[in-house]
Amino acid sequence: MMRKTTTEQTISVQEAIESRRSIRKFIQQPIDQQHLQNIFELVQLSPSAWNLQPWRFHVVTDVNLKKKLEEAAYGQKQVTSAPAVIVVTSDMEDVLTNIGDTVHPGLSEEQKQEEVANLSAFFNGMSVEDRGQWGLNQTNIAFGILMTAVQGYGYASNPMLGFDQDKVRDLLNLPKYVQFAGILPIGKPDDEGYPHHRFTLEKIVKFH
């Protein structure tokens, strides 16, 4: 699929990674809808095993819903401070229901049918919980790319896992089997965040 070029000012991947901080206070300014569209077009390209793409993104901008999300997130103010909050989920049951949509169109009909049969047999042999966890592992790849794309378009973010999942499921009317990769408040930063404090490369990288 050809993607349109954009004249929007973005920064390099290196700059996005180096400049990213976890921001908890945002300028009260709506996010450009075209920027959101561009960000998700980049995230849409995230890789996944067998191209199953289990990630689903719920973009919350409604003020009242954000207040309820803040309550579900134990009162963390960045949820209502941010002009948009992205709830990142994984839905492997939807993937299985529509497994044929993930198969590459370049395959022959026989190859497509074989791929669908193999994938269906593999995942139907797992419990709902186990394949949900499998899909969550894939979705975390897209979560990282999402944060980088957000930063690249000049916005800040703050990945969150501190929230009551059952309450968020109820607020967004999500099935029980849906898994959460996290919540990502995004917007123009109104503070600088903390400087990076990371382990040394010797601590985290081993060459064999």
Image: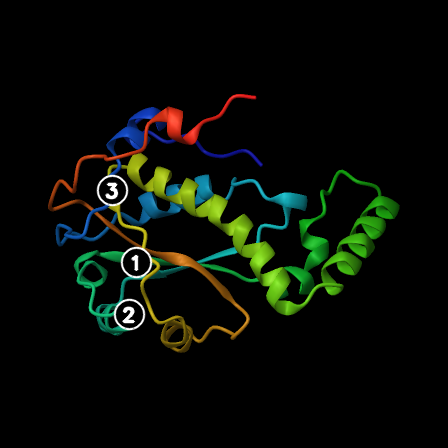
User: Tags 3 and 1 in contact by the CB under 8 Å rule?
Assistant: no
Residue 178, position as x, y percentages in the image: 52, 67
Nearer-N-terminus badge (3/2): 2
Q: Cα distance, mark 3 to mark 2?
A: 21 Å
Seen at 39% across and 46% down, the residue is: 37
Could you tell me which quadrant the N terminus lies in?
A: top right
Q: Nearer the viewer, residue 136 or 111?
A: 136
Seen at 32% across and 42% down, the residue is: 150
Kindly identify which residue carries mark 1.
85
Q: Cα distance, mark 1 to mark 2?
A: 9 Å
64 to the left or right of 152? left
96 to the left or right of 161? right
Residue 163, position as x, y percentages in the image: 32, 67
Q: Amino acid at mark 3?
A: Tyr
Q: Dot 1: few (<14), some (14–19), or many (≥20) neighbours within 10 Å? A: many
Q: Secondary structure at mark 2?
A: helix
Residue 26, position as x, y percentages in the image: 15, 51
Q: Secondary structure at mark 1?
A: strand
Q: Dot 3: few (<14), some (14–19), or many (≥20) neighbours within 10 Å? A: many
Kindly identify which residue carries mark 2.
69
Nearer-N-terminus badge (1/2): 2
Q: Amino acid at mark 1?
A: Val
Q: Dot 2: few (<14), some (14–19), or many (≥20) neighbours within 10 Å? A: many
Q: Amino acid at mark 2?
A: Leu
Question: Where 208 sits versus 147, above or below?
Answer: above
Seen at 32% across and 32% down, the residue is: 199
Residue 95, position as x, y percentages in the image: 63, 59
User: Tags 1 and 2 in contact by the CB under 8 Å rule?
Assistant: yes
Kindly identify which residue carries mark 3.
155
Dot in front, 3 or 2: 2
Q: Nearer the viewer, residue 99 or 205?
A: 205
Q: Report the colour scheme.
A: rainbow
